[in-house]
Image: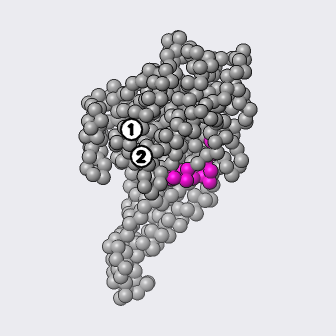
Amino acid sequence: MVHRGGDNLSNRTLRMRIDGGGALLEPWLDELYKIGAEPGGGAYRPLYGTAWAEAGDCVERWMKKAGLETRRDAVGNLWGRLDGTEKGKVIVTGSHIDTVRHGGRLDGALGIVAGLTATEALMKARGKPKRSLDVVAICEEEGSRFPTNFWGSRAIVGSIGKDEADTIVDPNGVTIAQAMRERGLDPAKIGSAARDDIDAFVELHIEQGAVLETTRQPLAVVSAIAGGVHLEIVVTGRADHAGTTPMDLRHDALVGASVMIQAIESITRAIGAPAVATVGRIRAEPDQINVVPGRVVFTVDLRHSDPGARRALEERTRSLCRTIAAERGLELEVRVLQERPPVPMHAEVRAVLTRAAQECGVRATELVSGAGHDAQILAARCKVGMLFVPSVGGRSHCPEEHTDPGHLELGARVLVRTLELLAY
């Protein structure tokens, strides 16, 4: 990768007051947050829903006003182009436009708004870049309507299966294909959304955790996105009468599952960061107050940034659960629901991000992302890099999601300098 815009750059750009500090960044974030606002707080913009479409139209207006040429691809990803003076692969920045239920103001929205603001600021200060710049509002990342994640970025890398749009349904029985047609999109053309002309993708995002705030760091360059596996564990015992079955004759599936859950937490704590394990769903059957539970199903989300360590964590989880089941006379079944490998951020892009931060007066720390991001999918086709700014209280995916405005502005300024180094 060629680092353009060398040492002879004007300090004007380095000290550029990104409109985020006053004129545009905060108001645009506020305006986007109002779209899909929910009575209980937060916003909800599900894929191909009304709020999702309104948000896309809003961002497209901003892009056109900024002088970008806009287009929507086959799945509804929105692209804003600033043409370069030279031929070659494109530099892309942006994030996703959908949200979880009761989602916060910044997740996804920050990357779109900061990317657009940065591109507009560069255009005003430097004119046309040498390499074309795209700002993208990715149609979906969260999986909050359909049981699939990264629909937009998977389309960009060409990894959506032939029949997926017709077989994946939302809670109301609507398929992705039906929802696409309602928005004037043709599911038969999904393959045309794939791109092979992207050189680098850079995203500014909130951390969604408390590491930066706890360590008092204003900015991080992401080193990797943790790999994860979702397991479904089925524990089968025997349903018996709660009053007539002595404790020593029981095969209680729920008690056995609870011991497994505690063991999973213990081994993950012993391994230490960045290993994490979460039991997010549990169901006992027959779910009656006066019956010993005969069957329990629970999920385990395991994550780690090192492939070997992630596999070891999974194997230790499976081994402990097998041992506990055998000791208690229970049957055990473990099924993999989803698995994604860890994804390192590209070394060259990380170096540019680190340099940009230094030239903006801050020494960025490095951080592993425990959350998933579009960058881990796009890494299959291009060089990827991410910047994190702190999340107050580590809160995210909720109305309390917040980042200090000074940290937002710093992140946006570093993004400006990064795009300048890559494209000018």
Q: Is residue 410 left or right of residue 234?
A: right
Find the magenta span and give its range.
389-401
Q: Is residue 98 left or right of residue 20?
A: left
Q: Residue furthest bottom?
A: 244
Could you give the CA–CA distance between mark 1 and mark 2, rounded to whole angstroms?
Answer: 9 Å
Q: Amino acid at mark 1?
A: Glu
The answer, for residue 384, to whether it is visible in the render is: no
Is residue 395 in the magenta section? yes
Q: Amino acid at mark 2?
A: Gly
* Residue 21 in the image: above or below residue 45: above
Q: Is residue 35 left or right of residue 209?
A: left
The answer, for residue 13, to whether it is visible in the render is: yes
Instruction: Identify the image quadrant of residue 287.
Output: bottom left
Give the numbered dot on residue 421. Answer: none
Is residue 397 in the magenta section? yes
Answer with mark 1 or mark 2, whichever residue precedes in sequence. 2
> Residue 191 location in percent, x, y?
33, 28
Of residues 343 and 238, the one nearer the viewer is 343
Residue with the mark numbered 2: 36
Question: Is mark 1 in CB contact (under 8 Å) with mark 2?
Answer: yes
Q: Is residue 361 left or right of residue 331?
A: right
Instruction: Identify the image quadrant of residue 17.
Output: top right
